[in-house]
Image (tube, grey):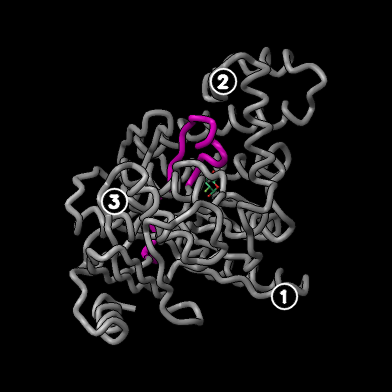
């Protein structure tokens, strides 16, 4: 849905023009999974799929929310009464942002918001972060709050952690707020320092496919939190602030010190090797050796499957089938337990790989996956 349609939808609902229309994208993470809550490295890029919101301020202490994608009418709330973890619906994301802004002392009195999203929900492509960031950016502009992109990302993370109640890291919100078209974002999640890495696959005759397995994931269901707690336990046992502080060159010694903590050892091994993989991918891209990142992506998948244990049979099927059909590399992307995988391939092999994955799903009696090409796109912006 384009900006004009969202604007028209707002006028129809609220009987007045919005003050503007904003959009914020979903993301794919190229490499660096489950590293963000360990103060480590990530490398996402923005998808062309976005959440789009038409917004107008209200000064009367009322927040009205409406989504074109969800059954039901306008939801009316009072910003002053918002209370964390009392809302299990989609409205918790935009309301959580209003809550986080107000809690940080920003004078957001109220708003009328009408939104829609093309980011597949539950696909591991950051549909929630897109919703949060589009609302944060709109309110930042309209209330002239002067917050920078990374500050908006932090507030959106707080909305998700505290208001929604999902213990996620900072990657998705930063990706949605800060990515640039034609680039992947090399992000140090400890201090949020960033580097835009040119990532124009089409110019090299390459493609990156997203395969949404249609297996729905949910981060608040406990498994994500368990991995996070396990990583924190590992850091505590090793006497470091975060697993980011365990040098790759000292990994074996660190693992030996974990004694019979087998599960913690697997988590630590994933996080420390994954940070090293991000740095390797950055070095390869910067030296122009883009095809060579394929095997590094595949190594990352094996680590998430065997050590971190967040893959699932459908994601493994995508990866195995794509590799057997000529892909340069493949891995699950995002939190896991379902959602999407990415496949790096020569442009000429895309049809063969897509067909092979579709046939493998059909042969296994699974719901057909949704396959599309991911083009690194722009981050959040005002569109009208
Ligand atoms: C989810 C979370 F929201 C991110 O913060 C990150 O931890 C990711 O899973 C795993 O890398 O998308």
Disc 1 secondary structure class: helix
Q: Residue at x 22, y 63 (%)?
A: 59
Instruction: Between residue 44 and residue 18, name the one nearer to us.
Output: 18
Q: Give yes or no for contact between labels 1 and 3 (Cβ–Cβ under 8 Å).
A: no
Q: Is residue 36 left or right of residue 380?
A: right
The CA span between labels 3 and 2 is: 30 Å
Q: Is residue 366 left or right of residue 86?
A: right
Q: Position of residue 32 (x, y in %)?
A: 51, 39
Q: Residues within 10 Å of mark 1 (few under 14, many from 20)?
A: few
Disc 2 secondary structure class: helix
Position above or below: 346 against 90: above
- Mark 1 and mark 3 lie on one chain; the one further toward the N terminus is 3
Image quarter of residue 65: bottom left
The answer to whether residue 15 is magenta is no
Q: Position of residue 381 (x, y in %)?
A: 25, 59
- Mark 3 and mark 2 lie on one chain; the one further toward the N terminus is 3
Q: Residue at x 54, y 61 (%)?
A: 87
Residue 362: mark: 1
Residue assigned mark 2: 248
Q: Position of residue 353 (x, y in %)?
A: 58, 65
Q: Position of residue 33 (x, y in %)?
A: 55, 42
- Mark 2 and mark 1 lie on one chain; the one further toward the N terminus is 2
Highlighted magenta segment, given as a residue range: 30-50
Instruction: Between residue 7 and residue 15, name the one nearer to us.
Output: 15
Residue 180: mark: 3
Of marks 1 and 3, the one in the foreground: 3
Disc 3 secondary structure class: loop
């Amino acid at each position: 849905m384009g900006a004009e349609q969202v604007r028209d939808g707002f006028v129809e609902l609220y009987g007045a023009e919005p003050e503007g229309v904003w959009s914020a994208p979903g993301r794919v993470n190229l490499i660096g999974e489950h590293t963000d809550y360990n103060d480590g490295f990530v490398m996402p890029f923005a998808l062309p799929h976005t959440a789009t919101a038409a917004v107008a301020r209200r000064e009367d202490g009322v927040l009205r929310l409406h989504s074109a994608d969800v059954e039901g009418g306008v939801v009316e709330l009072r910003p002053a009464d918002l209370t964390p973890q009392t809302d299990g619906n989609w409205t918790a994301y935009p309301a959580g942002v209003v809550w986080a802004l107000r809690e940080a002392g920003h004078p957001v009195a109220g708003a009328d918001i009408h939104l829609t999203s093309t980011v597949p929900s539950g696909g591991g492509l950051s549909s929630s972060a897109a919703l949060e960031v589009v609302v944060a950016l709109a309110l930042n502009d309209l209330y002239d709050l002067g917050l920078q992109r990374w500050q908006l990302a932090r507030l959106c993370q707080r909305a998700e952690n505290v208001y929604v109640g999902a213990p996620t890291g900072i990657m998705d919100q930063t990706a949605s707020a800060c990515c640039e078209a034609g680039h992947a974002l090399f992000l140090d999640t400890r201090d949020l320092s960033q580097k835009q890495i040119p990532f124009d696959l089409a110019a090299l005759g390459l493609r990156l496919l997203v395969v949404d397995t249609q297996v729905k994931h949910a981060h608040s269901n406990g498994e994500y939190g368990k991995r996070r707690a396990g990583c924190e336990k590992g850091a505590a046992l090793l006497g470091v602030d975060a697993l980011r502080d365990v040098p790759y060159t000292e990994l074996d010694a660190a693992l030996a010190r974990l004694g019979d903590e087998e599960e913690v050892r697997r988590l630590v091994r994933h996080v420390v090797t994954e940070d090293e993989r991000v740095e390797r991918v950055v070095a390869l891209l910067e030296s122009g050796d883009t095809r060579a990142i394929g095997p590094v992506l595949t190594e990352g998948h094996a680590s998430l499957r065997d050590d971190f244990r967040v893959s699932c049979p459908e994601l493994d099927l995508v990866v195995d089938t794509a590799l057997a059909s000529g892909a340069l590399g493949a891995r699950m992307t995002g939190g896991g337990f379902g959602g999407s995988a990415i496949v790096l391939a020569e442009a000429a092999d895309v049809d063969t790989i897509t067909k092979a994955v579709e046939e493998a799903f059909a042969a296994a009696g699974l719901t057909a996956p949704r396959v599309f090409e991911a083009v690194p796109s722009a981050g959040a912006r005002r569109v009208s």
